[in-house]
């Protein structure tokens, strides 16, 4: 068996065990206010980190390019409570326009 298959099987077993253990946690542990606040914020933090990495990184380099302008436009549109499709399309158009102009 190759090392890649060992890694795939190990990762699959780890993912299964994480899900199984997560479903086995007693509900009374999860109903605490502090845990509920943390569970609410975890997806926001993970998505923010993903956006940051995808915006400012290219391979192992820190870059500032058209993606920063797209994220900036998205932030402005979110500040004005624009619908999500408008935010995504606005950011995409801004990034594409700057990429093609410069």
Image (cartoon, helix red, strand yellow):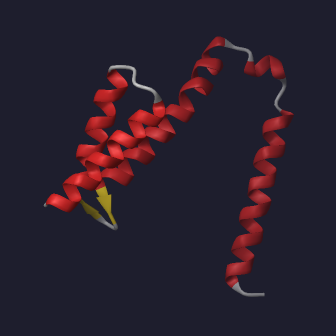
**Along the viewing direction, whichever of 72 and 87 lies nearer the viewer:** 87
Total labels: the figure holds: 0
Image quarter where the N terminus lies is: bottom right
**Along the viewing direction, whichever of 100 and 66 lies nearer the viewer:** 100
Is residue 64 shown to the viewer in this render?
A: no
Query: Which of the 4 quarters of the picture holds residue 51?
Result: top left
94 up-or-down from 84: above or below: below
Residue at 74 percent of width and 15 percent of height? 31
Direction top: furthest residue: 33
Image coords of residue 78 (percent x, y): 37, 26
Direction left: furthest residue: 102
Is residue 60 shown to the viewer in this render?
A: yes
Image quarter where the C terminus lies is: bottom left
Report the side of 68 relative to 82 (left or right): left
70 up-or-down from 27: above or below: below
Image coords of residue 26 (percent x, y): 84, 25
Residue at 79 percent of width and 61 percent of height? 13
Residue at 55 percent of width and 32 percent of height? 42
12 up-or-down from 95: above or below: below
Query: Which of the 4 quarters of the picture holds residue 30?
Result: top right
**Along the viewing direction, whichever of 71 and 85 lies nearer the viewer:** 85
97 up-or-down from 70: above or below: below
Image coords of residue 52 (percent x, y): 36, 46
């Amino acid at each position: 068996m190759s090392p890649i298959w060992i890694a795939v099987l190990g990762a699959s077993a780890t993912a299964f065990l994480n899900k199984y253990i997560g479903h086995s946690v007693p509900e009374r542990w999860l109903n605490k206010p502090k845990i509920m606040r943390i569970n609410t914020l975890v997806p926001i933090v993970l998505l923010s980190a993903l956006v940051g990495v995808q915006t400012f990184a290219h391979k192992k380099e820190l870059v500032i390019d058209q993606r920063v302008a797209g994220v900036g436009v998205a932030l402005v549109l979110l500040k004005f409570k624009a619908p999500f499709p408008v935010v995504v399309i606005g950011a995409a158009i801004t990034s594409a326009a700057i990429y093609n102009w410069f």
